[in-house]
Amino acid sequence: MGPGVVTLETSDALAWETTLFEDVSRHPEKHFVRLWQGSQSLVAPKKLAAKPGFHAASEALASAGWPVHIRATGGDATPQGPGILNVTHVYTWDSGGPFDIPAAYQRLCAPIKAALGANASHGWLPGAFCDGAYNVQWNGLKFAGTAMRFRPCASDKRRHTVLAHALMLINRPSAEAIGAINTFLQDLGETRVIRQDAHTGLPDGVAAEDFIERLLQGFDANKTGH
């Protein structure tokens, strides 16, 4: 996809995130910004894994080429695979006060919006997968989904370790990916329906390599502790 992007099996990428999180928790002076692309799969939060039909639904999706993995940052079911770029930002929140969730999400979204340009925004968007207040949108369509995990640092309980994650749609998600999510949700008894036309890829004329360069510059300027 471009320089600085690591291609991994999705399960390995999620384990890698956990390793970085634990490292920063023990060593608050460290921080990491990592770009990666996962294998074709779905990623789901633990709350969906607790549903009675989860194992049967996961087996059916795996047989169809969409293995399901569990992540620790919450959110909702999301796709991984070609055309999807992930950023994982792990750092120490060092404000001396309570952890500020909205400010931390703004910090995650700001470099993505800046890399997209003037028509970028964030907010809820019915029909988008993993819908939330900090969806990053381009011209009113979902470009990125975000999730976060945080806890007091193991070595200093006055500070917080933060794992901030964003999934960015370099290409608009395929009908197959949206279909896999909808099948999964339906099998779990969920009533919401995900729409392909609620999502967008990079703006026309923006090369992935240029977007990645701007993205890394934005995170580099903003990656130290708060």
Image (spheres, rainbow, N blue to C red):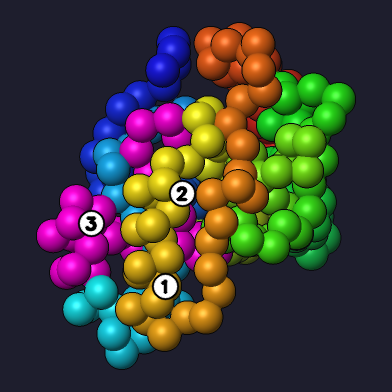
Which residue lies under the disc numbered 2?
Answer: 21
Disc 3: CA contacts within 10 A as few (<14), some (14-19) or many (>=20):
some
Mark closest to the chain's N terminus, 1 or 2:
2
* Type of the residue with mark 1: Leu
Question: Magenta residues?
Answer: 58-85
Quarter of the N terminus within the rendering: top left
Question: What x and y, as percent, mark residue 134?
Answer: 73, 53
Q: Quadrant of residue 159?
A: bottom right
Which residue lies under the disc numbered 1?
Answer: 185
In the displayed structure, 25 sits above or below 117; it is: below
Mark closest to the chain's N terminus, 1 or 3:
3
Q: Is residue 60 magenta?
A: yes
Task: Work out how far the residue at label 2 is from the one at label 3, CA to CA, in angstroms.
Answer: 24 Å
Q: Quadrant of residue 188?
A: bottom left
* Type of the residue with mark 2: Phe
In the displayed structure, 42 sits above or below 206; it is: below
Task: Work out how far the residue at label 1 is from the one at label 3, CA to CA, in angstroms.
Answer: 14 Å
Q: Is residue 122 visible?
A: yes
Which one is in front in this view, the residue at disc 1 or the one at disc 3?
1
Q: Quadrant of residue 52?
A: bottom left
Quarter of the C terminus within the rendering: top right
Horizontal side, residue 225 vs residue 80: left or right: right
Disc 2: CA contacts within 10 A as few (<14), some (14-19) or many (>=20):
many
Q: Is residue 20 visible?
A: no
Which residue lies under the disc numbered 3?
Answer: 67
Q: Is residue 125 magenta?
A: no
Q: Nearer the viewer, residue 11 or 160?
A: 11
Horizontal side, residue 129 vs residue 141: left or right: left
Horizontal side, residue 114 vs residue 87: left or right: right
Task: Work out how far the residue at label 1 is from the one at label 2, CA to CA, in angstroms.
Answer: 29 Å
Q: Secondary structure at mark 3?
A: loop
